[in-house]
Amino acid sequence: MITYSWRGDFADPEVNALHAEGFGHPVLDIGWREQLHRHSLGWVCARDAAGELAGFVNVAWDGGVHAFLLDTVVAGRSRRQGVGTGLVARAVRGAREARCEWLHVDFDDEHRGFYREACGFRGTDAGLIAL
């Protein structure tokens, strides 16, 4: 059983560990709580029956009608169980409740099926500059 919470409570070390696992980098010491409270519309925490963090997504925004999904990640032990789609569905609801009109996401080609087919995003033209 997975529970999803909009602006749910979390500890920085657990998000740092999940992010490292999901994105394949060493565990960093990022102050997620401060960063999210300062810059984000919200975030979604997915927790398993044992209370462990099973997934996470950040919903950044422009302060107006545009929200952006960032850092969608699911723990390895919880993948292929619908946790990712549950995270995105809850993020969509949170952005809609905040009266956002658009929810944007960018992704690598390997995640196209997840975002477009499983979550309902449609394709758009966009631009990117590597910095």
Image (tube, rainbow, N blue to C red):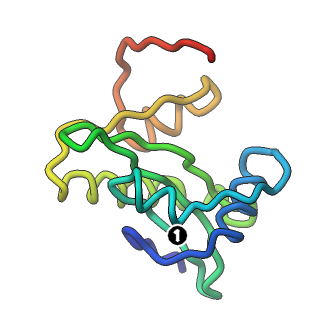
| Identity of the residue furthest to the bottom in this view | 50
53 left or right of 102?
right
Q: Name the residue: 74% across, 66% down.
A: 77
On the image, the x and y values in percent for residue 72 come to: 55, 49
Q: Name the residue: 62% across, 69% down.
A: 54
* Image quadrant in which the C terminus is located: top right
* Image quadrant in which the N terminus is located: bottom right
Answer above or below: position of 127 versus 38: above
Q: Nearer the viewer, residue 8 or 117?
A: 8
**Which kind of residue does numbered mark 1 sit on?**
Ala
Q: Name the residue: 65% across, 88% down.
A: 50
Answer above or below: position of 18 versus 52: above
Secondary element at image label 1: strand
30 left or right of 94?
right
Q: Name the residue: 43% across, 32% down.
A: 116
On the image, the x and y values in percent for residue 92 come to: 31, 51
Classed neighbour count for the residue bearing mark 1: other residues with Cα under 10 Å, few (<14), some (14–19), many (≥20): many
Residue designated by label 1: 46
Q: Nearer the viewer, residue 47 or 118?
A: 47
On the image, the x and y values in percent for residue 70 come to: 50, 43
| Identity of the residue furthest to the right in this view | 26
Q: Nearer the viewer, residue 79 or 51?
A: 51
Answer above or below: position of 58 versus 121: below
Disc tally is 1
On the image, the x and y values in percent for residue 88 come to: 42, 52
